[in-house]
Image (cartoon, rainbow, N blue to C red):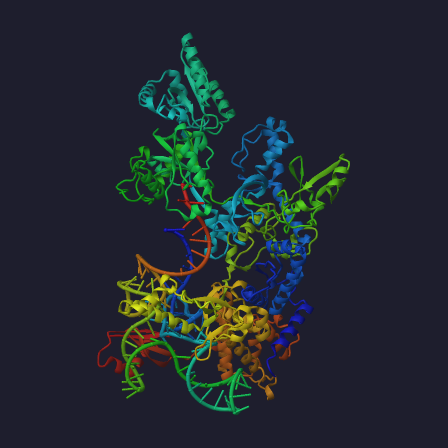
Amino acid sequence: MKYNFNEIEAKWQKYWAENQTFKAENKSDKPKFYVLDMFPYPSGAGLHVGHPLGYIASDIYARYKRHKGFNVLHPMGYDSFGLPAEQYAIQTGQHPAKTTNENIKTYRRQLDQIGFSFDWSREVRTSSSDYYKWTQWIFIQLFESYYCNDANQARPIKELTEVFSIEGNKNINAVADDDIEFFTAEEWNNYSNEIQQGILAKYRLTFLSETEVNWCPDLGTVLANDEIVNGVSERGGHPVVRKKMKQWSMRITAYAQRLLDGLETIDWPQPLKDSQINWIGRSEGAMVGFKVLSPALSKGKGVRDAGYLTGNPEIASVLLEKAKEMRANPTLAESTLWQQLKSKKLDIKFRQQHLIEEFIVDFVCLKKKLIIEVDGKIHESQIEKDEQRTKKLENKGYKVVRFTNEEVIEDIDAVIFKIKNELKNREVLPLGKDLGWEIKVFTTRPDTIFGVSFMTLAPEHELVSEITTEEYKKDIEKYIDVTSKRSERDRMADVKTISGQFTGAYAIHPFNGNKIPIWIGDYVLASYGTGAVMAVPCGDQRDYDFAKHFGIEILNIFQDTDISEYACEDKSAIIANSDFITGMPAKKAIKRIIYELEQKGIGEGKINYRLRDAVFSRQRYWGEPFPVYYKDGLPQMIDVKHLPIELPEVEKYLPTEDGKPPLGNAKIWHWLEKDGIGKIVSKEEFENSSSSGRLGGALELNTMPGWAGSSWYFNRYMDAQNAENFAGDNALNYWRDVDLYIGGSEHATGHLLYSRFWQKFLFDKGLVPVDEYAKKLINQGMILGTSAFAYRWEFENGDTSGKPKKTIFVSKDLMEKIIEERKAVENSKHNLDNDTIDMLATSERISDPKNKWSHFTPIHVDVSFVNASNELDVEAFKNWRPEYKNAQFVLEDGKYIVGREVEKMSKSKYNVVNPDDICADFGADTLRLYEMFLGPLEQAKPWNTAGITGVYGFMKRLWKLYHSGEDATFYVSEEEAIKEELKTLHKTIKKVDEDITSFSFNTSVSSFMIAVNELTAQKCNKRSILEPLAVIISPYAPHIAEELWSKLGNNESISTAEFPVFNEEYLIESTKTYPISFNGKMRFTMELSLDLSKEEIEKAVLAHEKTQQHLAGRTPKKVIVVPGKIVNIVG
RNA sequence: GCCUUGGUGGCGGAAUUGGUAGACGCGCUGGAUUCAAAAUCCAGUGAUUGCAAGAUCGUGUGGGUUCGAUUCCCACUCAAGGUACCA
């Protein structure tokens, strides 16, 4: 009987479907195992051979786990919202739902045909309202939550409003927008709803905000950072510009640290983890404020205004002397009070006789900006002076509290009580808010602060226009104009050019009071950190280059370090010339500087992340609608009981003429709710309804991005039919998480980051049992196409005949030969006569020597016209395109040979291989086996259909093993197996077991081949061998395995069979063929008993005649014997 | 630039803790079968050299450790992927 794969495969696919063989139960005595594939976007093109690679691997694993006694969940679904369906709808007017459904049908047919063991009863589609109902629900949960830093988790927003109404927000430690201002309970309670909502939006985990977004005019939508490649859209390569828009955002930044920490707990590929780490971009350092000298004064006229916190640098030295003196000779009252204040006795640092501007104050707490003055007997004249002084200090944001000597001496407790109270009630506004300008910078090297010799702001920095002096205004404007015209792309491509412009303004160094020129430069990015840097030329190469270019001073603050050529970015260098940190290594200096900054209240240790909040709005039709309507311009969540909010019908899928998203075309898109009954109505109906007790308004016009639905689908599979919950508790607690997740690495910073974020959020809310949803992840490599090329001869200038040009294709080797000959002619040009040189001079080839194809243009040829020996089916090619109809072909040996190149599989490269064809020609089992046989799962590899015959031949030999009866009918013998046969079987069991556990499926395919080759040679037809063989092969080639299994007399599916157990006994050998090597080189082998001792082996080997031959009379210096491995003779 | 992964025959790729480099398959060569082809089966196939037995070289390059290195260490180089004036 012939191996009729078509019949067998159809039969078993039908059987599995009818018997629901792979349906998983949410309850079992067996241990659970969840194998997940990244669900596909059902594109119109269908599957090509690259798509199923990961599915085959996961299917093998899932089937293997079933054999091993696990309750396996192996689901599949569709990520069915997305751009292509919408683009297609725009072009054809077809509803995206329709084309999506058709595409899904194709996908399903193709998937079924490969024989996957999916539990289709759990299928999910992100575009189905049963599913996106819960996507909307999760969105609402995010809206109703904020991130509490103290609890380090998401908490209900209700908690916030409760606290606000009792004590304002001063004690709230939550992740929020940067521009949060403090307010009291009273203020909060008096705010209008609008203001309250505005404030809450700064805390919510999803919030509406005016953000600068990547706007793609050609696609009419906003794109996420990871949807942009090299400054153009990933899809279609359209230009992208920055634009401000009101958008929903997700506060993923709240989870930055946990997303980072979580990576350590999961078994994911290192490169993938690295790109997430990179993307999150944590850097530790400090935030430092630099005060700006006011422009009017920084030109050198007059005195400095708002300056540095402590002393005015110009008179500081004089004052410091005086302060010292005063510290040494305190009055009784002063020393009494100091005893109570010093050493953080009140839990906060006070300084005595401290310089503030031109004053010396008695005591000051810099953090709270509280000054304590102790006065002697007050004279009239003093009062006026003191008042002036107080006023001035208060202008700087200080509060001055005065005590008399008597008060201090007589009742120190009362004084301390009063001070404590002052401290408690004092709220210090962030520095610089009302004190003139301050430039905040983030630096990872605060230890190099004494090396700062200039500052650079991004041209877009908000302070640029404020601080620029008259003198430099024109230059600055010109510079900004020039840089804004350069696209992001230009700026990125051109990193070598140094450009910048001085603003005319200066900042003051927070420690030494030096004047620091402020520049702007486009090497500083507005979007990272604070958009400003403190430039340390000696410690940062970019700053160094900038300083050199503009002749700015370069200070050296490293001990014994030469910085005449390059900056020193080495953290091990010892700090020098840096006041109190001189002599310290970087690590220590950083700590000290941060401490000082915090003491002075001018900076703090800070962890900065590159990760930005994720924009969540898309101006598309084919996506999840938001469960949101607007009332008085404020977004309102629709009560969850009304979900889903289904996509409305529109006439056109394009944006509206006034630039609104496609949903702006919907006629019926207003929310109307009354007495708890809600519906979507037209604008007219809404406006005509009575407004009493009415809720509602215009619905949100944006839709959710592609990653919304894919961020939680793995949880839905656990309980896909649940109508009450996104998944039931029992199911969630039973399946918990994915044990094995297989998918492409291209999702590293998109789906795989967002889904982790949502999972952590759901975990915080107690909705899922684990905060990392996939324990192990494997990236399957891409299968590349092998493109084929025909080489078209290009006519040269000399062709003046005027006749229509002929199309001539030259076979590959001939073409190469021609090129080589021409090269040879050229290279020996000096030996040629004038006529030949003239002829060559007119040829194109010479004018373009770089391009070796300049005579020939490679044309992509459909790979289906080419056979395994790279021979082109000329007739098929001629009929392919009208322009090739009359083409001529220059052949070699009567054949046209094409060139080959490995490229990404793509329609436009005509190198796509369809799995349907493979299944029809060789069968699904062969396809599965071959895809695994190609190479390691995680590696990218080219597809070459030619090799499939080897696997197909193997399948036929496997079939034959079971069909050793007359006329090749099915026959197995019940005889007992002999040792050799058992050995073959058991070493295969062992190998396959190990291979599956380590995901090296390619090597198990070879061990199957070896096993079948050996058993064929042994003429083995024994049941005791062939039955277990069918089981171990069944995860890979399930159809043939089922067929053989049933022929062996089993009534149940082979998937219920137990995986055979490896028995060491059958592999035990009594002898070993020892390689005998001389000086490490193997010369011959010798069969010896494994029972022999080292000495006996050595003796036997030395006695061998070949040994004597090789030694040629010499005595070996040393003989290394590793029993069971090798013998090496040295000498 | 940085991070990651990798470099083995004509090709895809094997090779436990360092222990016979090139498993398995493709391709190629020769043979059997056939009127012929397909299919199938058998033999050979890293390079150089030799009639042969054999010898020499050989895992990107150069060095090192070792009785012995594709495997470990150092330096370099090339390729692929990620990322980027990230302060």
Q: Position of residue A580 (x, y in %)?
A: 32, 33
Is residue A974 or residue A863 the one in the foreground?
A863
Looking at the rendering, in which quadrant would you find the C terminus of chain A? bottom left
Q: Would residue A465 appear left or right of B59 to someone viewing this image?
A: right
Q: Is residue A144 visible?
A: yes
Q: Nearer the viewer, residue A876 or B69?
A: A876
* Looking at the image, residue A661 lies above or below residue A818: above
Residue A119 lies in what quarter of the image?
bottom right
Image height check: is A295 above or below A939? above
Task: Give the quadrant of residue A679.
Answer: top right
Q: Residue furthest top?
A: A380
x, y percent for residue A1079: 28, 73
Viewer can see residue A379 = no
Task: Classify A12 as above or below A433.
Answer: below
Residue pictured at 67% horizontal, 34% vertical: A632
User: Residue A498's spot in the image, x, y percent?
Assistant: 37, 42
Question: Which residue is nearer to you in this view: A480 or A564?
Answer: A480
Give whichever of A264, A76 is nearer the camera: A76
Callout count = 0
Asked whether, in this view, residue A556 is left or right of residue B31, the answer is left
Q: Position of residue A1045 (x, y in %)?
A: 61, 76
What residue do we see at 42% from left, 40% from top? A524
Quadrant location, the N terminus of chain A: bottom right
